[in-house]
Image: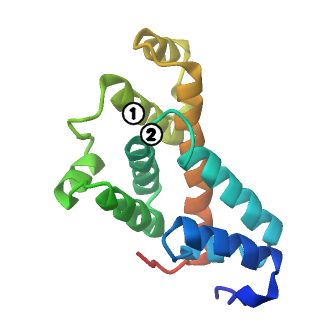
């Protein structure tokens, strides 16, 4: 079901997949390969992934936690596996990952980071219930609006990846 891309062709998809392989240590995740048949969408999703996951103020561990928990809440097996693997590469143990599923975040997370993870999960599952008091609670923790947007950006990106991976039946490659 995944398109095989000939890297020698210099096609737009091949060029982007080569960049992705370099960023992932020689491996282009299957979720990106699934987009190869639509080069502009592949490039757009890769660009957003880089902007959201590889740049910004929030620590990578916090972003990977948000990505994994959004995927867990959305029951996306592919993305749960991918972001659990990313967390393991950041020295998070399997028991710690399992504890995250039940709301226990790592001890090295600040109060602000824990609040942002909770906020992103709430925005995924109960966005309509978020009100001014919720936002004010984050501001009261000295969380900047840009940090809220960054956490929401992770949530938004992985809602889309969750749906795509599930609908297309992307094979787990982690």
Residue at which label 2 appears: 121
Considering every residue shown, the one lying at the far left of the view is: 95
Find residue 139 and report its horizontal and vertical position in percent: 48, 12
Q: Quadrant of the N terminus?
A: bottom right
The residue at the point 52 percent across, 17 percent down is: 135
SS assignment at label 1: helix
Q: How is the image coloured?
A: rainbow
Find residue 64 and report its horizontal and vertical position in percent: 42, 50
Residue at which label 1 appears: 118
Q: Quick one: label 2, few (<14), some, or many (20+) residues within 10 Å? A: many
The residue at the point 46 percent across, 69 percent down is: 78
Find residue 95 and report its horizontal and vertical position in percent: 17, 56
The residue at the point 45 percent across, 44 percent down is: 63
Q: Which mark is residue 44?
A: none
Q: Quadrant of the C terminus?
A: bottom left
Q: Report the number of discs.
A: 2
Residue 141, image quadrant? top left
Q: Is residue 114 above or below residue 43?
A: above
The residue at the point 47 percent across, 55 percent down is: 74
Q: Is residue 32 above or below residue 47?
A: below
User: Position of 25 compared to 42: left or right?
Assistant: left
Q: Is residue 122 above or below residue 64?
A: above
Find residue 156 and report its horizontal and vertical position in percent: 60, 45
Q: Quick one: label 1, few (<14), some, or many (20+) residues within 10 Å? A: some
Query: Is disc 1 in contact with disc 2, using a CB cutoff of under 8 Å?
Result: yes
**Mark 1 to mark 2 CA distance (whole Å):** 5 Å
SS assignment at label 2: helix
Give the camera-side residue of 128 and 20. 20
Residue 15, image quadrant? bottom right
């Amino acid at each position: 079901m995944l398109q095989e891309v000939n890297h020698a062709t210099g096609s737009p998809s091949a060029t982007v997949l080569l960049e992705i392989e370099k960023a992932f240590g020689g491996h282009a995740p299957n979720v990106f390969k699934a987009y190869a048949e639509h080069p502009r969408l592949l490039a757009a999703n890769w660009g957003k992934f880089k902007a959201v996951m590889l740049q910004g103020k929030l620590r990578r561990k916090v972003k990977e936690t948000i990505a994994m928990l959004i995927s867990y809440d959305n029951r996306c097996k592919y993305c749960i596996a991918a972001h659990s693997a990313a967390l393991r590469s950041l020295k998070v143990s399997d028991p710690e990952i399992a504890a995250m599923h039940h709301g226990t975040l790592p001890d090295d997370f600040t109060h602000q980071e824990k609040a942002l993870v909770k906020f992103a999960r709430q925005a995924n599952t109960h966005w309509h219930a978020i009100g001014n008091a919720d936002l004010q609670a984050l501001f009261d923790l000295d969380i900047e609006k840009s940090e809220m947007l960054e956490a929401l950006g992770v949530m938004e990106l992985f809602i889309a990846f969750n749906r795509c991976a599930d609908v297309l039946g992307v094979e787990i490659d982690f």
